[in-house]
Amino acid sequence: YINQHKYKEAEKLFLKAIVLMPDELDSYVAFGSLYSAQKKYLEAEKMYKLALRIDPKNKHVYNALGSIYSDQNNYPQAIAAFEKSLQLNPDSADAYSNLGNLYYIQGDYDKAISYLQQYLKFNPASADTYSVLGEIYNKKGDKEKLRMQIKKLKELGKDALARELEVCFEE
C-alpha cells in the first residue's frame, strides 16, 4: 500500500497489526516508514521510538531515525542516530554514506571524506560518492585528489558526472 500511495489503507492495516501483536517490531517500523513517506516526521519518530522499546539495538531503526532527522535538517540528532547505527553494526554502509553526506553539508570536509571513503569499501562503484568526494576536494583546493575522482568516474562510465567536476578546473 505504501508504494502505491494508499496511505489510509496501509494505516488501517498497521493499526490492526499493532493491536493484534503489540510486541511485533516490524509493525512499528512499517508504521514509521508510512509516516516518513508522508513527511509526518513526528509520527514517524514516535513509531520508531516505540520500535526501539521492543529492540533497543536495532540498527535499521536508528538508520530510519537518522533519515527523518536529516530530512528535517536536524543534523545533530541525525548524526547521533547514524553513529548509534554504526556502533551497533560497523558494517552499515548506509550509515557511513549518510554521515559522510551530513558532514559535507555542514562543511566538515575531513569527517565527510573519512565516512565516504568507508562507504566506498562497501560500494566501490558508487558514482555519486566519487562525485561528492570530488566536490569536497575541489572546495579544499586539492586538485590532485579531484582529478582522481574524475578518473574514477570515467572508469565507471559516468562521463556526465566527470564533466561536472571537470568544470572545477575551469573556475
Image (cartoon, helix red, strand yellow):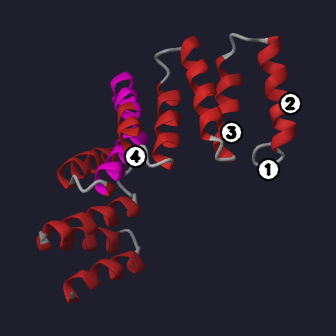
Question: Residue 5: which numbered mark, if any?
Answer: 1
Between discs 1 and 2, the one toward the N terminus: 1
- Counting the numbered discs, the total is 4
Whether residue 32 is visible here, answered yes or no, is yes
Q: CA distance from mark 1 to mark 4?
A: 26 Å
Residue 37 position, x and y percent, is 67, 46
Image point 79% across, 27% down: which residue?
14
Image point 29% across, 55% down: which residue?
104
Question: Residue 35: which numbered mark, if any?
Answer: 3
Q: Are marks 4 and 3 in contact (CB under 8 Å)?
A: no
Question: Residue 98: which numbered mark, if any?
Answer: 4
Image point 21% across, 87% down: which residue?
171
Q: In the rendered structure, which segment of residues is drawn in magenta?
A: 81-104
Between discs 4 and 3, the one toward the N terminus: 3
Q: Amino acid at mark 2?
A: Lys
Circle 1 Cα neighbour tier, 10 Å, few/some/many (<14 / 14–19 / ≥20): few
Circle 2 Cα neighbour tier, 10 Å, few/some/many (<14 / 14–19 / ≥20): few
The residue that disc 2 covers is 12
Q: Amino acid at mark 3?
A: Tyr
Q: Are marks 1 and 4 in contact (CB under 8 Å)?
A: no
Q: CA distance from mark 4 to mark 3?
A: 20 Å
